Image (cartoon, rainbow, N blue to C red):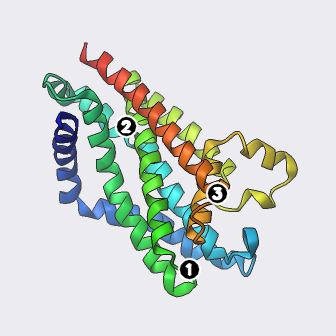
């Protein structure tokens, strides 16, 4: 119960400024909507895997991209708190360290969930077929993945608290290749053989494939199971590394 209550306290502490700056959520939605408006028409009637319509496989890719780039960059706010000393005051409390990490991560994911739902609603009149239960499960899987990535981002922020440019360099150097090699913009099944093989070493690939399967209404398939496993592993790894770093920062 202490973990859940501390997570709630951490979440409420972090979400307050976000709610007061609601326009950041609105502007955060602009990029995926621009991709939707400007990139999808270029696809024409190019089918995705199993003959799916462009929107049916493009929208889940955009949702994954939204989660990836937001969570991988969320540690930047922590670097500012570390430099100002406000985060050290939080660490002086008896709050659970994993709860602090999870609460901060959920603060990043709550607006993303709203943005993802808006993106799905906007795309529906243009041909996206809704499969409510699989889509909700897909969003839940992304939330699990996002907790792991956000925790890794916070760990990087703590490790590079004296050099903010190092955080920016490392986070974006990792996120961009993952996105391109993960098949976010185009299915990797259409890629050359060498590129497809390289994509199999990218954990994001399995998440994107799982999201596309779920957005097509497929609840029980190998891509979905693989995506759930990858999301769970990333969450476990992220929390382990993040909690380790946050405990070091407490010393």
If the image is split into quadrants, where does the N terminus sit?
top left
Q: Which mark is residue 128?
A: 1
Q: Quadrant of residue 21?
A: bottom left
Tell me the element at label 2.
Answer: helix
How many residues crowd around disc 1 within 10 Å: few (fewer than 14), some, or many (20 or more)?
many
Q: CA distance from mark 2 to mark 3?
A: 27 Å
Q: Is residue 243 above or below residue 50?
A: above
Instruction: Please report whichever mark, 3 or 1, sits nearer to the chain's N-terminal start.
Output: 1
Residue at (38% x, 28% y) in the render: 242
Between tags 2 and 1, which lies in front?
1
* Residue 161 can be seen, yes or no: no
Rendered residue at 55%/73% (across/down): 36
Q: Give the crowd class for mark 2: few <14, some 14-19, many >=20 residues within 10 Å.
A: many
Whether the residues at callouts 2 and 3 have beta carbons within 8 Å, the answer is no
Most foreground residue, 83 or 8: 8
Which residue is drawn at the image coordinates 39% and 65% (left, top)? 115
Give the percent coordinates (x, y) of residue 84.
21, 29
Q: CA distance from mark 2 to mark 1?
A: 33 Å
Residue 45 visible in the current orientation: yes
Percent across and percent down for residue 123 are 51, 79
Using residue 83 as the reference point, say whether residue 89 is left or right of it: left
Rendered image quadrant of residue 97: top left
Residue in the image at 14% along x and 22% along y = 92
Which disc number belongs to residue 209? Answer: 3
Q: Is residue 24 above or below residue 69?
A: below
**SS assignment at label 1:** loop
Q: Earlier in the sequence, mark 2 or mark 1?
A: 2
Q: Is residue 24 left or right of residue 55?
A: left
């Amino acid at each position: 119960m202490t973990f859940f209550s501390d997570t709630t306290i951490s979440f409420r502490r972090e979400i307050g400024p976000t709610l007061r700056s609601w326009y950041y959520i609105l502007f955060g939605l602009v990029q995926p909507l621009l991709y939707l408006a400007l990139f999808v028409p270029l696809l024409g009637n190019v089918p995705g895997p199993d003959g799916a319509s462009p929107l049916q496989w493009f929208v889940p890719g955009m949702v994954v991209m939204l989660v990836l780039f937001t969570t991988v960059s969320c540690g930047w706010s922590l670097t500012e708190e570390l430099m100002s000393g406000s985060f050290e005051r939080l660490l002086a409390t008896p709050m659970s360290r994993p709860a602090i990490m999870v609460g901060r991560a959920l603060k990043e994911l709550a607006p993303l969930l709203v943005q993802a739902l808006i993106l799905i609603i906007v795309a529906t009149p243009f041909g996206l077929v809704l499969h409510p239960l699989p889509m909700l499960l897909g969003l839940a899987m992304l939330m699990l993945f996002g907790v792991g990535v956000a925790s890794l981002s916070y760990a990087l922020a703590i490790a590079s608290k004296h050099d903010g440019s190092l955080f920016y360099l490392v986070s974006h150097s990792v996120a961009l290749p993952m996105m391109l090699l993960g098949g976010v913009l185009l299915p990797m099944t259409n890629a050359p053989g060498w590129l497809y093989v390289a994509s199999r070493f990218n954990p994001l690939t399995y998440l994107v494939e799982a999201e596309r399967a779920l957005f097509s209404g497929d609840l029980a398939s190998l891509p979905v199971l693989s995506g759930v496993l990858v999301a769970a592993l990333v969450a476990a790894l992220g929390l382990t590394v993040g909690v380790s770093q946050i405990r070091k920062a407490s010393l």
